[in-house]
Image (spheres, rainbow, N blue to C red):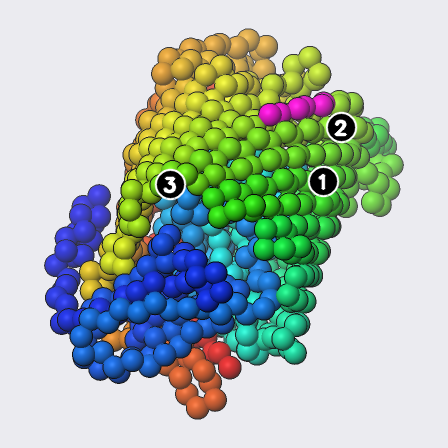
Amino acid sequence: MKKFYIVILFSVLLPNVLLAQFSFSGKVIDSRSLLPLSGASISAAGITAQSDDEGRFSLRGLKTGEYTFRVSYLGYQTYASTIQITQNNERIIQLVRSGILTDEVLVSATRANNNSATSYRNLNREELQKNNLGQDLPFLLNQTPSVVATSDAGTGIGYTGIRIRGSDATRVNVTLNGIPYNDPESQGSFFVNLPDFTSSVDNIQVQRGVGTSTNGAGAFGGSINIQTTTLRDSAYAELNNSAGSFNTWKNTVNVGTGLINGKFTFDGRLSRIKSDGYIDNAFSDLKSYFLSGAYYGEKDLLRINVFSGSEKTYQAWNGVPEYLLQTNRTYNSFTYDDQTDNYTQDHYQALYTHTFSAKLNVNAGLHYTYGRGYYEEFRDDEGLANYGIDPQVIGTDTIGRTDLIRRRWLDNDFYGITYSLNYTPSSTLNFILGGAYNEYDGDHFGEVIWARNASNSEIRERYYNGNGFKTDFNIYARANYQLGKLNFFADLQYRSLNYTIAGTDKNRALLDQEDKLNFFNPKAGLTYQIDPNNSLYASFSVANKEPNRDDYVNSTVQTRPRSESMQDIEAGYRFNNAKFNIGLNAYGMFYKDQLILTGRVNDVGESIRQNVDKSYRAGIELDGGWKINNKLMWNATASLSRNRIDRFTEVYYFYDADFVPTGDLQENSYDDVEIAFSPSFISSTEIAYKPFNKLEFALLSKFISRQYLDNTGNGDRSLPAYDVHDLRLRYNTSFKQIKNVGISLLVNNIFSEKYVSNGYTYSYVFDGDLATENFYFPQAFRNFLLGVNLKF
């Protein structure tokens, strides 16, 4: 924490004197309708601003001289004008429509805007690329409010995780161009399956709470809405190469045609990332590609995306036992040379928009995802019967156990359609009717590929073979109405699920369950625009979420858990002008039947989740930025929360001196306890200093308070608070035919903070004594990534 205060003091002491005297301000409007354009980008000499809801903007801090001012807005021709500044200047700028549709219409149904009564953060391509040197997407979102990023290998490369407001990835709704990305069965989002995907991303909106999520699993902590490559006017080629600690390498090639004949564009990317990881053996070998072609017409837009990712990662899933944490932080319990996870995922998307008139348009998306892969494990002294293999008789000896290598496979298809019909009868009223239908068909099976004593087993014989089939239908209607300074919205969603599992599970137990669930998810809110810079908002939303595959597999029809429900109340204030912006948001998320781990296991020892009657998360979030002067910028976030379960019952099992279960158990009840992995305080800062236009230094800081590994509030089962600081340097110039030569240096954990970002725990009674085992995922000490970017 001491380092954190040093950083804050450092930011205050940096120079903040403005020498410039004049401003360039005005209003951006549509040349035909003369209506104001909100969100237009205005720039000159490295100074930027955005127009507000009334189209107004202001660029301050301009010295006397000649400037070229550029104003751009999606769907409009870019305005450029050279102006001599000798005094304050004010103009009305009329933008001319470009005559073609733009990609923003494809994701409009899933996005929040200035009038939305929800908390969110937008990140554009430039912001994302600043830190895009090889780390996975959760680490590129680490500076957004209430976010905690984790990494199994300790470097942010390979298997990573994200939590928003304490909710893990299974409770964060992710869409790619409006298409659901969460795995329909586990409900997680595995970004390792799409390595370097950020290099093909145009923008991301991170929403907190229920937000505007429309397709896919319910958003119980937040949603991440990703839009991939969009229209670029001119042809380009880009090479990105980076290298760094732990033998990390990233190579990326991006190319695009720009707009051909005013109608067509083609874009492509090829990427490779390799890293040895901080944890022993925890290497990553990742490959991906992205292809996109689009047709732009006056009334039609069609975009086809084909992209794929392939990952091979050495398993670091077990973490480091607590007793080794001080002496061997990089310990990995796995030593078999091919103890790896291997998975490939192919995505196909067809996105279409047709505009019938200025008041009516329709969007539709067809998608198909094919995923297949396995993880391989060496197992010591396994029972042959567990794999359907007969005991092996050699002479007078009967062998019932053996060393073996197994593979557990997942082979799945996910496909469907999404759509939205947008009707705007007037400037004050907007309707959206949308929905989706998706199907998932996933095979789960296992093979023994080698055994020291194989008995009657056959090559590629499956010792278990199960299937999960899921249909997901939803339809929603949304309306926005502007009444003076008040904007009202209402959203009604109906979602229907059917999930069937059959065959056998990994323990060779029979599976035979079907569940049908119907959810009603209403949302309503209002926003009051005090003036162009100030607004207030409030909303109430309901979200429902089904159990995941493990909840069904590890239970029976009689014992399986109920679905979860949440009521989300949000209220906030926003202020935004050319120099300063701040968002202050208060929330309360109240759960019914939230699913958590209690320590209880099923008849084969698998941990099972159980419903708790009542629990809640309530807090305050701050998200702000201050442009101190033309050279110095300070962004900061802070989240203060209280996360509680009203009543929690912990379960211990008893084992005798030979570690054989006795069949006894003990239950301990707790009232008003902390929810696991829910820090009460999260903060981040980014202090960026540009001594001149081509060079930028930035100090990035992150503080996470204590997190508990279970729901007992026991400090001996927790992750200590940590305070981590990174340093980023960027230099950009041009050279002959090269439009941009960019050099980036990212030094992570510059003070070599000794911290762990994730872990797990379990307890039991052994020979009469309570035993607790904690496992942690340590993060790397000081390390670096150096990148070179060439744009042609």
The residue carrying pointer 3 sits among few (fewer than 14), some (14 to 19) or many (20 or more) residues within 10 Å by Cα, namely few
Residue type at mark 1 is Asn
Determine if the magenta segment contains residue 785. no
Badge 3 is on which residue?
484
Which residue sits at x=66%, y=24%? Answer: 518
- Side of 335 where 670 appears, left or right: left
Any mark on residue 656, and which?
none
> In front here: 115 or 653?
115
Mark 2 secondary-structure assignment = strand
> In front here: 394 or 302?
302
Badge 2 is on which residue?
500
| Image-quadrant location for residue 174 | top right
The range drawn in magenta is 515-520
The residue carrying pointer 1 sits among few (fewer than 14), some (14 to 19) or many (20 or more) residues within 10 Å by Cα, namely many
Question: Magenta region, mostly helix, strand or loop?
Answer: strand
**Quadrant including the N terminus:** top left
Residue type at mark 2 is Thr
Which residue sits at x=54%, y=57%? Answer: 104
Question: From the viewer's perspective, is residue 53 above or below residue 510?
Answer: below
Badge 1 is on which residue?
438
Say whether disc 1 or disc 2 marks the residue closer to the N-terminus: 1
